[in-house]
């Protein structure tokens, strides 16, 4: 695997349109980004921003019965996931791309011991014998910080605590030794002390395995502790994309600013007021003219409601940074 | 007229036609009936299909069509009475058990367990054994046997609703139990009970025919399909129509009720409730009854 | 010194485990008070008993022992109609506003019903008051005919607050009132609580796991672990100098949004799992996971004073700082 120049995951002008019997919505609209090996990209957004569909749709991991029409390209090591057959995609999911879900064990059968269910997948994807697979599972569970893996494998899903469940979920995600790990809100349901443990674990695993991680989250705390790059999504579009230091310390897009203001850090002065964003995110069932954020934006000009802003390079950033806001980018210059 | 079109849309025309024609026959039976269903005319004994008797006459020369119509009346009246009695009592018990929980819940649920563990036929047998076979006693016996079904159904619905935050909010606001029960929980339970009852009606029609067939329900000369079947048994070779016709009537009624229940359940819960799922749920429920 | 509006003393709420019949000691001897016009934070991780405490205060769970004094009466001993009238002056805001509104009622109907329950017999007066309530929570009056499912999360939570206000409460118990809402909406609801406090002198018990939000909203904070209060104090004092090792670990785990601050800070990663509330550790509840535990910790520590109005249930209050010794990652 000497493809140091080629990013393992490259998303280009990716658009998803979902069709239900009653309406069609476009939760992902022309998104482009890439992740390098050994890099952590955080995709940040509120509910309905399309951040989950952006990452799950190319892997065919949307809920059953959802009809998704995809345009653009999502290249994994040069191969477009959108052109793959179901069986090729399945091979990629188990091997090259690992996935960690918000509550991974809800996908497991509650009345069967977890050991057997884990080893089955490993057996199939890595082509190991049952004994080899069992040993591999035990190794993986130790790797994700679960002591005494053999007895852990004898337990049922409900016997694990939230943190342990997520550790098992991560073990499942990395079982195929993936080059890309996609983690969908892996810490959302967890308490802060457990969340800190999981963030440490992901950092540690990434150092050891050198994979690229895409973490989908709405929590800027997780982003600042774990990610190198951050992509902020609003209404299915990228509003800002850049290094974590650039985006979190000096956000360019008004939406990123508003979102960051909404999560007061423990270090802000005690008399800080609660600041949020006025209004509501747009209804995705309607076509959005202009900038999707304009109706809630304090910086909006008349032009913003008409022309859809493209991603512009933000001057004076420490590293490459893009923001979809001509008003602010001009101010930076 | 919107509600009519809506009903039509939900239920579908075959089901609506089937159920409403039975209802029509039951309501206007005495008007449309060509003869008095108990009037004997031995000169017409065993007469086949004819102008006098469209569907023939039985061994005592009673008009079969009139007796079938009277049978529909007897059956539907029984079904409606039992559902009203068992539904009301069951809902009352179930609501109290589901909302208050504790010892009240224990008592009601143990009563239900008892009801489920003893086959309804047994209950009816015992009841009729003590009080004597009659139409009224059969209705009472069936009502008693059917109460646990509705008590348990209601209890489940109410207990689930009562732990919802909006009911808890009402408790915190200081709403009286009566307000919470009658304004919020009963409407929820009623919906479920009606859905279940519409499918259950077919089962009840069968039970009434069963009991009468065994001589525990409707007594001669009053007309009832199960009772018609049993009195026609000796003549099954000679005049199979005497057995087949009440059988067809009963089958059509049961199919009508089942379709009705299924369509209503589907309309209430269109995504979760596929036809197959409904059958499965019924099977599970039945197994639960037997267990 | 202000007379507290709500004084909870040694409150215990236990549940019975349905399988084993064992006692689950969800809330195990909590003493806490609320002054009028004060927002008090109650923080802790899931399963620590903070929600159980809140639900016990409003009568949704039954207390095993202890007392809840409100307006000179023990709420737990209140009975009948007058008891209900007093109790409803303590209102509750649920985490999920959608499930706490009836799917069969419009906003107007829900508020109207709350007013009927509160004894407002005149329907014209109820209509007028409904509009007033909507205004108090900054909702447009057109919303009266909407159902909960037709509104956004923030609007629903406002309706829930308006409904609670219909009972003319003196105390609001708010159980994670913003955690089901999108982050950009949370400020609107938090500011509403601040407004109720400032304009109406409302006392709020703010139950939350988000320590950053509690820090800015609450004057005082209680930290709960395994059914007990571990530390209490003025927000300014408690967040600046946490005295209990658990609070120290908890605060050190909260991620900071500034990546420079986040990557250069000291952090304690707690090992192991929270013990079961069926069989909590003897002595200090936290000793099984405490990096600073000593032999003294096998006896239950009392609440030891640290700074004025700030104390911790730790034998080494004022002498222990587990985070200062932690390595920078």
Image (spheres, rainbow, N blue to C red):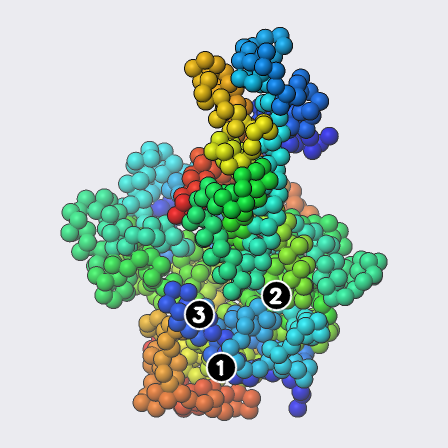
Residue A247 vertical position relative to residue B62 in the rendered view, above or below: below
Question: Which of the two labelled residues, at mark 1 and mark 3, occupies the earlier sequence position?
Answer: 3
Q: Position of residue B186 (x, y in %)?
A: 63, 51
User: Which residue is identified by label 2?
Assistant: C93
Q: How many marks?
A: 3
Residue C162 visible to the viewer? yes
Residue A36 visible to the viewer? no
Question: Which of the two labelled residues, at mark 3 and mark 2, occupies the earlier sequence position?
Answer: 3
Picture residue at 54% right of the left edge, 51% below the top: B151
Q: Position of residue A64 (x, y in %)?
A: 43, 39
Question: Which of the two labelled residues, at mark 1 and mark 2, occupies the earlier sequence position?
Answer: 1
The span from disc 1 to disc 3 (Cα, nearest Å) is: 17 Å
Q: Position of residue C97 (x, y in %)?
A: 60, 58
Of the two numbered discs 3 and 2 in the rendering, the one whose residue sits closer to the viewer: 3
Marker disc for residue B90 = none
Picture residue at 57% right of the left edge, 55% below the top: B93
The span from disc 3 to disc 2 (Cα, nearest Å) is: 26 Å
Residue at mark 2: chain: C
User: Which residue is identified by label 1?
Assistant: C29
Residue at mark 1: chain: C
Could you tell me if the residues under marks 3 and 2 are in contact, i.e. CB atoms within 8 Å? no
């Amino acid at each position: 695997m000497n493809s140091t120049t080629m990013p393992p995951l490259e998303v280009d002008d990716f658009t998803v349109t979902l069709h239900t019997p009653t309406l069609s919505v476009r939760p992902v609209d022309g998104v482009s980004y890439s992740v390098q090996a050994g890099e952590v990209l955080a995709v940040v957004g509120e509910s309905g921003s399309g951040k989950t569909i952006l990452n799950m749709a190319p892997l065919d991991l949307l809920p059953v019965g959802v009809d998704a029409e995809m345009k653009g390209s999502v290249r994994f090591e040069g191969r477009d996931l959108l052109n793959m057959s179901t069986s090729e995609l399945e091979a990629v999911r188990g091997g090259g791309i690992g996935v960690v879900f918000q509550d991974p064990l809800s996908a497991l059968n509650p009345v069967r011991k977890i050991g057997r269910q884990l080893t089955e997948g490993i057996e199939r994807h890595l082509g190991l014998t049952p004994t080899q697979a069992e040993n591999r599972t035990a190794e993986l569970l130790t790797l994700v910080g679960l002591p005494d893996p053999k007895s852990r494998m004898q337990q049922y899903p409900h016997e694990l605590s939230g943190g342990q469940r997520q550790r098992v979920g991560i073990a499942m995600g990395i079982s195929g030794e993936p080059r890309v790990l996609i983690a969908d809100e892996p810490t959302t349901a967890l308490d802060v002390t457990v969340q800190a443990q999981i963030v440490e674990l992901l950092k540690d695993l990434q150092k050891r395995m050198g994979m690229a991680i895409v973490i989908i989250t709405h929590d800027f705390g997780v982003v600042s502790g774990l990610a190198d790059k951050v992509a902020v999504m609003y209404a299915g579009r990228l509003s800002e994309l850049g290094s974590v230091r650039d985006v979190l310390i000096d956000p360019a897009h008004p939406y990123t600013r508003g979102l960051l203001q909404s999560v007061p850090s423990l270090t802000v002065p005690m008399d800080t007021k609660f600041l949020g964003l006025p209004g509501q995110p747009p209804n995705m069932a309607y076509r959005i003219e202009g900038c999707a954020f304009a109706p809630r934006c304090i910086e909006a000009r008349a032009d913003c409601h008409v022309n859809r802003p493209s991603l512009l390079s933000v001057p004076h950033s420490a590293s490459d940074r893009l923001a979809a806001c001509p008003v602010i980018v001009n101010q930076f210059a | 007229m919107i509600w009519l079109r809506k009903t039509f849309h939900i239920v579908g025309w075959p089901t609506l036609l089937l159920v409403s024609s039975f209802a029509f026959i039951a309501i206007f039976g005495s008007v449309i009936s060509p003869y008095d269903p108990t009037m004997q005319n031995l000169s017409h004994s065993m007469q086949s299909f004819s102008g006098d008797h469209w569907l023939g006459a039985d061994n005592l020369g009673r008009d079969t069509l009139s007796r079938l119509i009277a049978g529909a009346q007897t059956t539907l009246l029984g079904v409606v009475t039992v559902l009203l009695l068992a539904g009301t009592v069951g809902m009352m018990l179930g609501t109290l058990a589901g909302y208050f929980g504790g010892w009240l819940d224990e008592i009601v649920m143990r009563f239900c367990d008892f009801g489920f563990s003893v086959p309804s036929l047994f209950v009816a047998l015992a009841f009729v054994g003590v009080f004597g076979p009659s139409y009224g006693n059969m209705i009472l016996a069936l009502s008693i046997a059917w109460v646990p079904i509705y008590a348990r159904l209601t209890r489940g619905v109410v207990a689930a609703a009562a732990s919802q935050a909006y009911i808890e909010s009402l408790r915190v606001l200081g709403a009286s139990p009566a307000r919470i029960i009658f304004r919020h929980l009963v409407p929820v339970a009623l919906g479920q009970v009606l859905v279940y009852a519409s499918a259950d009606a077919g089962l009840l029609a069968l039970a009434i025919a069963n009991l009468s067939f065994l001589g525990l329900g409707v007594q001669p000369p009053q007309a009832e399909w199960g009772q018609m079947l049993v009195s026609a048994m000796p003549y099954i070779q000679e005049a199979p129509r005497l057995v087949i016709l009440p059988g067809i009537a009963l089958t059509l009624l049961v199919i009508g009720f089942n379709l009705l229940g299924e369509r209503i359940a589907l309309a209430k819960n269109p995504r979760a409730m596929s036809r197959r799922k409904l059958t499965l749920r019924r099977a599970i429920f039945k197994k639960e009854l037997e267990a | 010194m202000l007379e507290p509006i709500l004084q909870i003393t040694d409150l215990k709420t236990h549940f019975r485990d349905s399988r084993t019949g064992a006692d689950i000691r969800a809330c195990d001897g909590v003493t806490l008070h609320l002054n009028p016009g004060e927002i008090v934070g109650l923080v802790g991780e899931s399963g620590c008993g903070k929600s159980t405490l809140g639900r016990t205060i409003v009568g949704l769970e039954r207390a095993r022992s202890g007392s809840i004094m409100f307006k000179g009466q023990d709420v737990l001993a209140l009975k009948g109609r007058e008891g209900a009238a007093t109790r409803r002056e303590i209102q509750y805001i649920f985490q999920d506003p959608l499930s706490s509104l009836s799917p069969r009622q419009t906003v107007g109907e829900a508020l109207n019903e709350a007013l009927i329950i509160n004894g407002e017999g005149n329907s014209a007066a109820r209509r007028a008051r409904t509009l007033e309530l909507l205004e108090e929570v900054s909702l447009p009056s057109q919303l009266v005919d909407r159902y909960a499912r037709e509104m956004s999360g923030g609007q629903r939570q406002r309706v829930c607050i308006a409904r609670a206000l219909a009972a003319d409460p003196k105390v609001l118990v708010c159980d994670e009132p913003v955690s089901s809402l999108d982050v950009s909406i949370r400020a609107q609801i938090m500011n509403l609580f601040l407004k109720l406090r400032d304009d109406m002198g409302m006392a709020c018990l703010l139950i939350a796991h988000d320590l950053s939000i509690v820090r800015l909203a609450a004057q005082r904070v209680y930290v709960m672990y395994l059914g007990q209060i571990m530390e209490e104090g003025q927000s300014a004092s408690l967040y600046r100098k946490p005295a209990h090792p658990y609070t120290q670990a908890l605060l050190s785990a909260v991620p900071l949004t500034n990546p420079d601050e986040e990557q250069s800070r000291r952090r304690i990663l707690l090992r192991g799992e929270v013990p079961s509330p069926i069989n909590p550790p003897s002595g200090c509840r936290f000793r099984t996971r405490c990096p600073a535990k000593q032999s003294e910790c096998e006896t239950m520590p009392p609440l030891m004073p640290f700074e004025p109005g700030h104390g911790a249930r730790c034998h080494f209050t004022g002498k222990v700082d587990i985070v200062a010794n932690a390595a920078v990652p």
